[in-house]
Amino acid sequence: MPLICVIRHAILVSAATAAAVLLACACSAEETPPSIDYPSSRTSTKNINVGRIFVGVDQGIEFNGVKVYLSLTSDLLGVDTASDKTLWHHEVGAFWSGMAIKQIEVHGEKVWAVELHGSPDTDQFDKHYDYYELKSGKKIDLPAPKPSGVSLLPIRIISCGGAFAKPFHALITTQANFDTFLKRAYGPSRRDIGA
């Protein structure tokens, strides 16, 4: 008789252990942030009201009670899963081909954010990401990573009318940076040089 009790106990322990493992797997699967890369051809399956217009969407990703869509008309929107109401909306442009939910650090605090990214086939030097808070939709501006490599100082600068008091370094990352560089290098009356 004691042998049967031992066997039953072993089976109960094994069943309890298996249930704990299954519960742990289910919890970790729910906590894994989703991501999606869209195909080059898409068809809308649903229209979502964003206030003044409806936008067509197909697939979205859902996390922490918010379903996020990248619409077919270049809109990023967050929808409350419980009420199906639009929480936030941004026009983000047609560059993006996918998104993911990421936990990032902003001002020393970890927040869940929607990460927009271009094609996974993009050259590593052309990769660009934009981030939006998951719950509020507020755009998060992260500092740009410092590019790797060596800074080169030109030996001679040839310019059409520019006057340099001393050499300078410029990292061109935006159109505004480029315009500032052109004004400094060629003077305020440049004639569409490099534009």
Image (cartoon, helix red, strand yellow):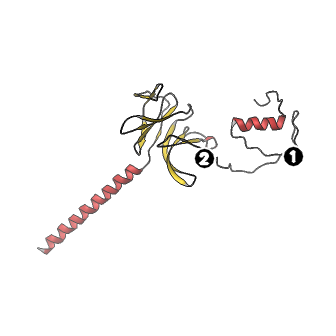
In the picture, measured across the screen, residue 12 lies left or right of residue 149, that is left
Q: Could you tell whether 17 is left or right of 31 in the image?
A: left
- Label 2 CA crowd tier, 10 Å (few <14, some 14–19, many 20+): few
Kindly check if marks 2 and 1 are in contact, taking CB atoms under 8 A apart as contact: no
Which residue occupies 80% across, 35% down?
183
On the image, numbered disc 1 is attached to which residue? 166
Q: At numbered mark 2, what does the secondary structure look like: helix, strand or loop?
A: loop
Q: Residues within 10 Å of mark 1 (few under 14, many from 20)?
A: few
Residue 40 image position (x, y, % from top left): 50, 31
Label placed on residue 152: none
Q: Label 2 to label 1, Cα distance in Å?
A: 31 Å
- Name the one closer to the observer, 188 or 149: 188
Taking 171 as reference, is 51 left or right? left
Q: Is residue 101 above or below residue 11?
A: above
User: At x 42% / y 50%, what residue is drawn?
Assistant: 32
The spot of residue 162 in percent (x, y) is 87, 36
Question: Farthest residue in the top direction?
Answer: 53
Q: Residue drawn at (51%, 27%), measured in percent from left and top?
A: 73
Classify residue 34 by image quadrant: top left
Q: Position of residue 13 (x, y in %)?
A: 24, 66
Disc on the earlier residue, 2 or 1: 2
Residue 22 sits in quarter: bottom left
Q: Which residue is mark 2?
A: 142
| Residue type at the position of mark 1 | Lys
Q: Residue flagged by tag 2: what amino acid is it?
A: Leu
Name the secondary structure under disc 1: loop
Q: Position of residue 83 (x, y in %)?
A: 36, 36
- The C terminus, quarter of image: top right
